[in-house]
Every structure is written in structure tokens, then in C-alpha cells.
Image: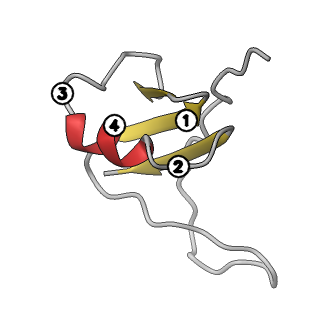
Amino acid sequence: MTWTLPEPMLSSPVPEPRLRPGWAAELKWDGFRALVSADSGKVALRSRRGTEMGLALPEIVAGAAQLPDATALDGAM
């Protein structure tokens, strides 16, 4: 089965940090936004624009290699 990274969730400014009941949010700090996927022993680490980041961040790739198959993470570092 071919599996690809989902589209990243982009942050957006809000006038107030209040959330509706049942909602969750993450503050956006300066840094890198990345998507990582682990599937069939292969790890992909890419920026939100699709730039390969694995060579620059081998420790993230090594950690992601331990994730279960068909796992995708979207986050900032």
C-alpha cells in the first residue's frame, strides 16, 4: 500500500486565545514546522512545503523509525 504524508495544518492568528469547549490548540513559537511519517520501515521528514529535512535532523529520523507503521506526526521543533 502506498502511503503519503497528509497536508500540514497551518497556524492562524486569533484575536483571543479562548477555545470552544472540546477544542485544543498549540502555541506557535519560532522554529521549524515538520511532518514525519513512518511506514514499512521507511521514515519521511519534510517541511510543510515538502523540503526533505531528514539529513539535517538524523536524531528525529532515528526516533521516528521506532514508531508503528502508518504513523504520521505534524508538529514544530
- The amino acid at mark 4 is Val
* Distance from Cα at disc 4 to Cα at disc 3: 10 Å
The residue where tag 2 is placed is 67
* Distance from Cα at disc 2 to Cα at disc 3: 20 Å
As rendered, which of 23 and 15 lies closer to the eye?
23
Mark 3 or mark 2, which is nearer the start of the sequence?
3
The residue where tag 4 is placed is 61
- The amino acid at mark 1 is Ala
What residue sits 61% from the left and 48% below the top?
Answer: 68
Mark 3 or mark 4, which is nearer the start of the sequence?
3
| Secondary structure of residue under mark 1 | strand
- Give coordinates of residue 46: x percent, y percent: 42, 25
Q: Are marks 1 and 4 in contact (CB under 8 Å)?
A: no
| Secondary structure of residue under mark 2 | loop
Q: Crowding at label 3, few (<14), some or many (≥20) Cα neighbours within 10 Å?
A: few
Q: Crowding at label 1, few (<14), some or many (≥20) Cα neighbours within 10 Å?
A: many
Left or right: 12 with respect to 31? Answer: right
